Amino acid sequence: MQREELEHRAAIHAHLRGALAIPAGLLFGLAALGNEQVGPFRHDWVFLAGLAVLGGAYALIARAYRRHYGRVSPSGGEQLRSVVALVLAVALVYGGSLLLRSRAGFSLDLPVNPIAVTFAIVMLASYAIGRVLRPHHAAVYGMLLAAGALPVWHGEDPSNVALMLCGAAIIACGVLDHIAFTRAFPAPAVDG
Amino acid sequence: MAELDRLVHEPGRLAILTVLSSVADADFLFLQRATGLTKGNLSSHLSKLEDAGLVRIDKRFVRKKPQTTLTITDAGRERTARHWEQLEALREQAQAVSASQASQSARRSAASSRVRPA
């Protein structure tokens, strides 16, 4: 095994536990439905119940990963990279959305979907900073970026559509990440 | 050239130390998955590394379940890095010798093709 491959195992463990992305992606969908007040989601308690279910699912999946793949504490460098990625993410999504399309005086007011655009860029950057960027990330978030950047989003605020698209992208990448993760950590050998 | 570190050089132990050098700490299961070693092999290597002061093993109970946390020591980190540097230096030497031999062989065949009678 090469040195880089071994040193990279912790980064893969930290960033490619893709099954966790499924409840996270569904949360985006839940938020969009709650905003639109569609059907039962016009009641706040339905949203809160959905949140609790997704939170429970997330915790169970995290426990399953720990049980089958172990636990690792990231190095100081890795933690710093995560903090940098998070700060950049917040700044980019918030600032970028205001710049591209908002009621702010400095807004370019472009007919694009700012949340889809900025979210796609943030996800690609965070995978790159975590040193786990894969072709499927580029493909899925590239498509999200392209869809959001098309100048077709005239009229109403497209935020809820963006949330749905982002949720779908998160889930798609999550499934592929999990496949990559299980390949990186095959079943351990057994003593003869 | 300095002798290779025999304790660190063993592939299983080198893999263990290299993985641990990239994290703050890890548990036994993660290390087993990351290195592909069997439980028995991993335990045996970890004992040797702990005895040599390259790894620290912390065993405790968390919610009545045993948890083994492994951390590389400063000495372990230093010896691992030095070992990889030695391996890299050896690789570069081997590549230089191989390139030199290939070049000499090419010159010899060019020279022999010039003196061959028509």
Image (cartoon, coloured by chain):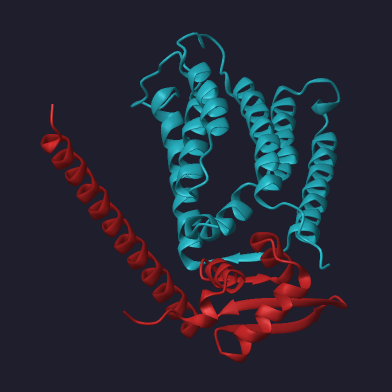
Chain colours: A cyan, B red
Say above or below: B57 vs B112. below
Q: Please name the residue shown 54% across and 26% down the image.
A: A139
Say above or below: B44 vs A30. below
Position in image of residue B2 (x %, y %): 35, 82
Position in image of residue A144 (x %, y %): 55, 23
Residue sitting nearer the eye, A36 or A69:
A69
Q: Is residue A37 left or right of residue A89?
A: right
Q: Is residue A163 left or right of residue A41?
A: left
Q: Quadrant location of residue A44?
A: top right
Which quadrant would the C terminus of chain B be assigned to in this image?
top left
Residue sitting nearer the eye, B108 or A134:
B108
Say above or below: A171 vs A143. below
Q: Quadrant location of residue B41?
A: bottom right
- Residue closest to the far front: B117
Residue sitting nearer the eye, A38 or A182:
A182
Position in image of residue A135 (x %, y %): 53, 32
Q: Please name the residue shown 67% across and 30% down the image.
A: A172
- Tally the marks: 0
Q: Please name the residue shown 69% across and 84% down the image.
A: B58
Which quadrant would the N terminus of chain B be assigned to in this image?
bottom left
Q: Quadrant location of residue B117?
A: top left
Q: Is residue A70 left or right of residue A4?
A: right
Position in image of residue A136 (x %, y %): 57, 31
Residue sitting nearer the eye, A78 or A135:
A135
